[in-house]
Image (cartoon, helix red, strand yellow):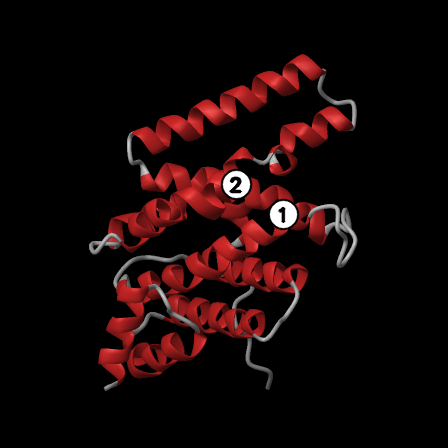
Amino acid sequence: MELELLEQSVEENTLNHDILKTRQRAERDSFTPNLSIRVHRALSWLKKSEQCEDDDSRFTFLWIAFNAAYAQEWSQCSAIPEKDRYQTFIDKLVSIDKAGKLQHLVWDEYSGPIRCILENEFILQAFWEFKSGRLQEQEWRTKLRTAKQAANHALANTDTSKVLSIVFTRLYTLRNQIIHGGSTFGSSANRSQLRDCTNFLQKVIPIVIYLMMDGKNEVWGDPVYPLVNSM
């Protein structure tokens, strides 16, 4: 019965913490220690996000869930830029995703949150570099045009991994804005992009966790903060 519910949830894209937790409990003895701690931590933050009613909190906890899933040990963190690290992570997920769950998500959501995210200049880092005086207007406009061309090229070539990487690059700008105190809780200034980004994360994070459990034989790397049991 639980397996049937899991398969139905995958098919209908209605995965949530409780369903994923049931699978995790059933399979965790076969997980490597690194995968086990990543899935356990990511699920805990996913659960917290589902308990929140405001998008500021939901987005923050969903991003932490994503970070718990993919973040690598410090030496690798310092050597590889953030966007390259999650590009590598997304590439691995897509290679595991034999049923095309991520591909279906991208194309199902393209006319909704994903299109809005890709077209929103306020979550392109170059916009804020222009506003702070680090870029001239022409430079900013060029970066905006280049970003749109890259997104359109990835979409035209059904490059799921690249589309997701570009979307997460936009989300990372919003993440920085919120985490570093660059926005006001409950503000009306950034509601549309926050809503679209939160809705996207709410759908993609459960799939990420699901695919990690599918890839239990993959090497996921050491987490940034390993579990330490106090004596």
Instruction: Report the front residue among 55 and 85.
Output: 55
Amino acid type, callout 2: Cys
* Residue 133 at least partly seen: yes
- Judging depth in this view, the residue of 23 and 3 nearest the camera is 3
Residue at the image point whose x is 59% and y is 75% from the top: 51
| Image mark for residue 116 | 2
* Residue 133 in the image: above or below residue 87: above
Question: Which x, y percent locates residue 53?
Answer: 63, 70
Tell me residue 39's x, y (percent). Answer: 42, 69
- Does the image show residue 72? no
Residue occupying the point 53% across, 41% down: 117
- How many angstroms separate mark 1 from mark 2 (CA)? 9 Å
Query: Label 1's element?
Result: helix
Q: What residue type is labelled 1?
A: Ser
Q: Name the residue under label 1.
A: 192
Quadrant containing the N terminus is bottom left
Q: In this view, does 162 lie to the left or right of 50?
A: left
Where the C terminus falls, by quadrant?
A: bottom right
Q: What element carries label 2?
A: helix
Left or right, 13 with respect to 118, comes to left
Q: Earlier in the sequence, mark 1 or mark 2?
A: 2
| Contact flag, marks 1 and 2 (Cβ < 8 Å) | yes
Residue at 57 percent across and 24 percent down: it is 144
